[in-house]
């Protein structure tokens, strides 16, 4: 009996330590970024584009990268919605929900979700070579939309799947077609979940560096057309950190604060939306 | 809609096809065994030996998994079997947050905190010198990155185990830990393995954070305090010159193909296991 108690105590101790380590790593990451990045953060960072010699420590900001990232990820998210929403609706309304076909598509999306982003970058680069597109906003959008498509489609599929069967049948029994049911009943019922799927995908897209490395290029100017190269925040951080100058490295930390703030902000907004619009959902 | 759905499903094949097509030139010119097991990497002379990079990836991923698996597993057990509602309400969002932090931010964190720590404390402790950019550093950063993957999948697997099973065990006089050990863990084993393989494949393909802290020296690492040059870092570092040296683009696409292939196999297998786990309880 005594041995059991000791073993249980040791196990619980290990659990506490492990949970503590996980907690500590969250605190350490956010703490380090904020402590190092905050002092270098100023208004110029977010309102100016790099001036000459920016990467040698001269004045300027990373507005080019902020705008570039928002445009690029925004475009990619729109492209992804156009593909994901039909997939989620098709799998749950037109195809038999648990059919072998649906299972295969889900498996395939899950697998795509796990493919490293550098592979999407390389594949996007291949596509661009084939299509004759140079490293540009458009190229980056293609790569990032491929990257976030599986995640968005699966997340939407999960929320649409939760729509009660009865609701569909009630709609059919009133004479609605499948299409009307899909758009007017299911999409509305799943709206909070769909919005949060979109925002989560946005967060993943804007934070990813490896997929835009070959495809989006980099530029000190704000892109004015789809075919111009665009700077992105993760790459701005990476390049600034790679310089030997402490002032520029400090700006990399500040840029990391900005990127983290955008990602966390988007995720908080997502949670709020779910909470706010969750009330209109038929339980 | 059917068309869109099918084409999304076929994206895997499209990516595989594209990568194979582009890496074909080098595959026809060199024997596969040379490419995989030669350590000579001199693109200018047409020598493409991937062995140091493959070893670099294996070392870094190995260290990450060794650190992450026990910590994630114990945390998952705690969260699903022991923790009260309040602890769960705090830890859940925090783990989501960890999953949402961009990889480049993990890289910055690694450079700011783990690199100096390894340089100033770990290396002197073992009486060696290191600049801090090592297998160990990359492993630690990757381990933290895959915590959320392993923890959240494990918690889901534990939650799919019927409460009645636990109650039956408890009513026979087993303690909570005995119940966890003999009932929950045994029942959840396939799911736990699948969760860890998912975490592993995430670490395997992670690029940016590793690129920033692993040191990127072309050599086979001999110990955890040596620098490494993992495959994803190789692709990311050399995209600029790949159009100017013959066969280089093909070699880098082959590197991407290797990553793709390994991750594909790992995730198909672990997903199939997870689907079976889900079905058994559902």
Image (cartoon, coloured by chain):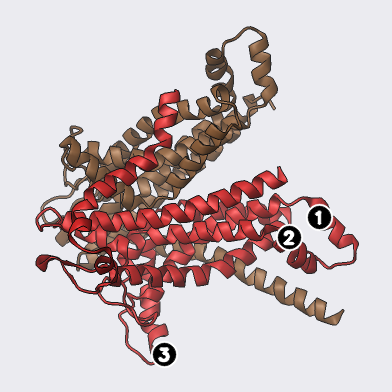
- What distance separates the C-alpha of mark 1 from that of mark 2? 8 Å
Identify residue for label 1. Answer: B165
- Picture coordinates of residue B95, whole percent (x, y): 55, 55
Q: Nearer the viewer, residue B85 or B55?
A: B55
Residue at 81 percent of width and 57 percent of height = B166
Residue A207 in view: yes
Label 2 marks a residue whose chain is B
**B278 relative to A46 in the view: left or right:** right
Earlier-in-chain disc, 1 versus 2: 1
Q: Is residue A11 above or below residue B73?
A: below
Label 1–label 2 contact, CB within 8 A: yes
Quadrant of image for the N terminus of chain B: top left
At 60% from the left edge and 69% from the top edge, which residue is drawn? A18
Q: Which residue is mark 2?
A: B184
The chain coloured brown carries which letter? A
Residue ranking furthest to the bottom: B127
Please give the residue where the numbered disc 3 appears in the rendered image: B126
| The quarter of the displayed image where residue B185 is located | bottom right
From the viewer's perspective, tell me whether residue B276 is left or right of residue A156: right
User: The C terminus of chain B lies in which quarter of the figure?
Assistant: top right
Assign a secondary structure to mark 3: loop
The 10 Å Cα crowd at callout 2, few under 14, some 14 to 19, many 20 or more, is: many
Q: Is residue A67 visible?
A: no
State the residue in front, B267 or A24. B267
Q: Which residue lies most toward the top here?
A: A175
Q: Position of residue B87 (x, y in %)?
A: 68, 57
Q: Which chain is red?
A: B
């Amino acid at each position: 009996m005594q041995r059991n108690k000791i073993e249980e105590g040791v196990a619980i101790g290990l659990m506490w330590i492990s949970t503590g380590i996980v907690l500590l790593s969250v605190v350490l990451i956010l703490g380090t970024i904020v402590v190092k990045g905050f002092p270098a953060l100023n208004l110029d960072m977010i309102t100016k584009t790099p001036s000459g010699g920016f990467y040698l420590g001269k004045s300027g900001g990373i507005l080019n990268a902020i705008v570039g990232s928002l445009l690029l990820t925004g475009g990619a998210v729109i492209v992804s919605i156009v593909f994901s929403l039909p997939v989620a609706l098709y799998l749950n309304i037109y195809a038999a929900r648990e059919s072998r076909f649906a299972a295969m598509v889900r498996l395939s999306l899950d697998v795509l979700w796990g493919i490293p982003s550098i592979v999407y970058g390389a594949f996007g680069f291949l596509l661009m070579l084939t299509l004759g597109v140079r490293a540009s906003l458009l190229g980056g959008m293609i790569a990032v939309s491929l990257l976030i498509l599986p995640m968005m489609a699966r997340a939407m599929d999960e929320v649409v799947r939760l729509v009660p069967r009865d609701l569909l049948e009630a709609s059919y029994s009133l004479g609605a077609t499948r299409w009307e049911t899909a758009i007017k009943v299911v999409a509305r019922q799943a709206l909070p979940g769909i919005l949060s799927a979109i925002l989560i995908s946005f967060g993943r897209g804007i934070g990813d560096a490896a997929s835009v490395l070959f495809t989006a290029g980099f530029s000190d100017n704000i892109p004015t057309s789809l075919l111009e190269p665009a700077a992105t925040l993760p790459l701005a951080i990476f390049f600034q950190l790679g310089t030997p100058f402490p002032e520029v490295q400090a700006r990399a930390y500040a840029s990391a604060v900005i990127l983290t703030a955008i990602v966390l902000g988007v995720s908080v907004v997502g949670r709020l939306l779910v909470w706010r619009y969750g009330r209109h959902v038929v339980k | 809609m059917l068309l869109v759905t099918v084409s999304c499903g076929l994206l895997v094949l499209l990516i595989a096809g594209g990568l194979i097509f582009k890496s074909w030139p080098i595959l026809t010119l060199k024997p596969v065994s040379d490419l995989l097991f030669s350590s000579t990497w001199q693109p200018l002379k047409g020598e493409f030996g991937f062995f140091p990079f493959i070893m670099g990836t294996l070392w870094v991923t190995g260290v990450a998994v060794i650190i992450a698996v026990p910590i994630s597993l114990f945390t998952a057990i705690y969260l699903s079997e022991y923790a009260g509602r309040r602890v769960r309400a705090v830890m859940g969002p925090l783990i989501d947050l960890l999953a949402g932090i961009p990889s480049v931010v993990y890289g910055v964190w690694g450079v700011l905190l783990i690199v100096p720590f390894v340089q100033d404390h770990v290396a002197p402790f073992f009486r060696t010198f290191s600049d801090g950019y090592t297998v160990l550093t990359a492993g630690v950063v990757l381990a933290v990155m895959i915590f959320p993957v392993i923890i959240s999948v494990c918690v889901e697997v534990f939650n799919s185990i019927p409460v009645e099973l636990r109650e039956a065990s408890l009513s026979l006089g087993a303690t909570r830990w005995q119940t966890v050990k003999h009932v929950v863990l045994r029942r959840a084993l396939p799911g736990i393995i699948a969760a860890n393989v998912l975490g592993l494949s995430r670490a395997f393909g992670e690029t940016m954070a590793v690129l920033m802290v692993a040191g990127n020296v072309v050599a086979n690492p001999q110990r955890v305090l040596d620098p490494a040059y993992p495959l994803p870092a190789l692709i990311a570092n050399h995209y600029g010159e790949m159009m100017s040296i013959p066969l280089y683009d093909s070699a880098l696409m082959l590197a991407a193909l290797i990553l793709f292939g390994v991750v594909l196999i790992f995730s198909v297998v672990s997903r199939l296991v997870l689907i079976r786990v889900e079905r058994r309880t559902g």
